[in-house]
Structure formats: structure tokens, C-alpha cells
Amino acid sequence: MKLKLTHAIDMHTHADHISGAASLKDQLGCEYVKYANAPARCVTFHLTDGFECHLGNHRVKILTTPGHTQDSITLIFPDRILTGDVLFLDDAGAGRDDLPGGDAGQHWDSLQLTRSSHSIPCS
């Protein structure tokens, strides 16, 4: 089976390391995807809250979840969510909110929204 990478999605800006998504864009010609207010200038496709699309045969809806960063997003699938650093399933619990752009109050609100995201329809 031959696969081709068409999109690289960064779910938030990283303050402590560099993402490889921009390099993937340059080397493979794929779209570099981030939330609409992301500061990166090399993004080729900006997502907005509520945007819906398909990843292969899987429906996905974009949910903005600021707090860890101002451009954090969560991917809502019909049967699962991908939260980036909004939520961790270990002792850490959630991404840091003390880095540039972090906001503890927004992060709390995003955690509550993410927790209830199973009820968000993805049609």
C-alpha cells in the first residue's frame, strides 16, 4: 500500500520545542494545518472552530480549546477525541498553562468542554 501525506496538523504552538510539521510541508509538499490564530507564518491551511472534514473515512470536527496555548485545538471523532496538550491521561493531567499564551481559566473551561465533547455531533 502506498500512502501520501497530504496534511500535517499541529494541534497547538509549541513553546519548548520546534514542530516538524513545517519541514514536512517543505519536504513533502503537504498542507501545514493549524488553528486560525496560530502565530506561525508558514501555515498553509487555517482551521476555525466547528470546521468539519474527513481524515480518510473518519469524520472529524475541530473544537478550539485554548488555555495551554491560545491556538490549541481538539479533534472530535465520532468515537474518540485527540486533545493535544489540553488533557493527558497520566499523573500530569493537563498541559502547562504557564508558558507564553497560556491561561489557567481558559484551560479549565477547555477541559470542561473537552470532557463533554462526546455529545458534540459530528455530521
Image: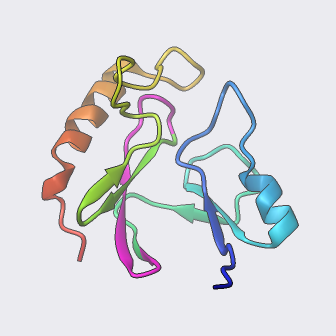
Task: Give the vertical position of 93 relative to 5 (above or below).
Answer: above
The image quadrant that residue 93 belongs to is: top left
Could you tell whether 118 is left or right of 5 in the image? left
- Range drawn in magenta: 54-70
> Is the C terminus in the top left, top right, bottom left or bottom right quadrant?
bottom left
Image mark count: 0
The residue lying at 57 percent from left, 18 percent from top is 99
Residue placed at 67% from the left, 43% from the top?
Answer: 39
Q: Give residue 52's position: percent from left, percent from top.
A: 37, 72
Q: Is residue 61 magenta?
A: yes
Q: Camera-side residue: 107 or 83?
A: 83
Q: In the displayed structure, would residue 86 be above or below residue 100?
A: below
The residue depicted at 68 percent of the width and 73 percent of the height is 5
Q: Is residue 33 magenta?
A: no
Residue farthest to the front, as pictured: 1
Looking at the picture, how far across and down is residue 120, in whole percent? 18, 60
In depth, the one of 79 and 120 nearer the eye is 79
* In this rendering, position of residue 42 left or right of residue 86: right
Q: Residue 81, how many percent across, how many down?
A: 32, 52
Residue at 73% in and 71% down: 30
